[in-house]
Image (spheres, helix red, strand yellow):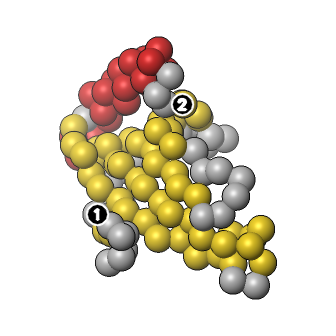
Amino acid sequence: MTSANMPLYDVRRILRARKTDLTILGSAVHSVRIRCRGSCGAMEGLLRRLVDEGVRKGLIEAKSGVDGILCVYQYRRGPVFPTIERFFVVAPALAYEKEHECFGR
């Protein structure tokens, strides 16, 4: 993989409760979209600009995991199911675009 092929992913998830226990995560449906591609530096710069603008407006939250990968959350999953989350991340081009057939509903 070349650094010119680094995608910016838009990940959305709907998390549902387990049928036998409404307090435990059951199934999840998701949507993964590639919003743009470019060099690693360009995509990380784009993500940082999104962070700067979004945090200033109170629209997003940025979080770096223990792996050092920055995720920009537009919606964080809540403590009660069903719940949603949406985040943007720059990562190697290993994932492909996909969406659960019922996601739009």
Circle 2 — which element?
A: strand
Q: Residue at x 66, y 41 (%)?
A: 66
Please say whether residue 41 is visible from this viewpoint. Answer: no
Residue 55 higher or lower than 102, as above or below: above
Please state which of residues 103 and 63 is positioned toward the viewer in this rendering. 103
Q: Amino acid at mark 1?
A: Glu
Please state which of residues 4 and 22 is positioned toward the viewer in this rendering. 22
Q: Earlier in the sequence, mark 1 or mark 2?
A: 2
Q: Position of residue 39 (x, y in %)?
A: 25, 35
Q: Residue furthest bottom?
A: 20
Residue 43 higher or lower than 98, as above or below: above
Please say whether residue 56 is visible from this viewpoint. Answer: yes
Q: Position of residue 31 (x, y in %)?
A: 37, 63
**Is 44 situated left or right of 63 in this image?**
left
Q: Residue at x 69, y 78 (%)?
A: 18
Callout 1 crowding tier (Cα within 10 Å): few <14, some 14–19, many ≥20:
few
Q: Residue at x 24, y 46 (%)?
A: 35
Callout 2 crowding tier (Cα within 10 Å): few <14, some 14–19, many ≥20:
some
Labelled disc at residue 8: none
**Is 16 situated left or right of 32 in this image?**
right
- The answer to whether the residues at label 1 and label 2 have Cβ atoms under 8 Å apart is no
Quarter occupied by the C terminus = bottom left
Residue 31 higher or lower than 3, as above or below: below
Q: Amino acid at mark 2?
A: Ala
Q: Position of residue 88 (x, y in %)?
A: 41, 42
Locate residue 28: give its quadrant. Answer: bottom right
Which residue is the site of mark 1? 97
Q: Residue at x 29, y 46 (%)?
A: 7
Which residue is the site of mark 2? 62
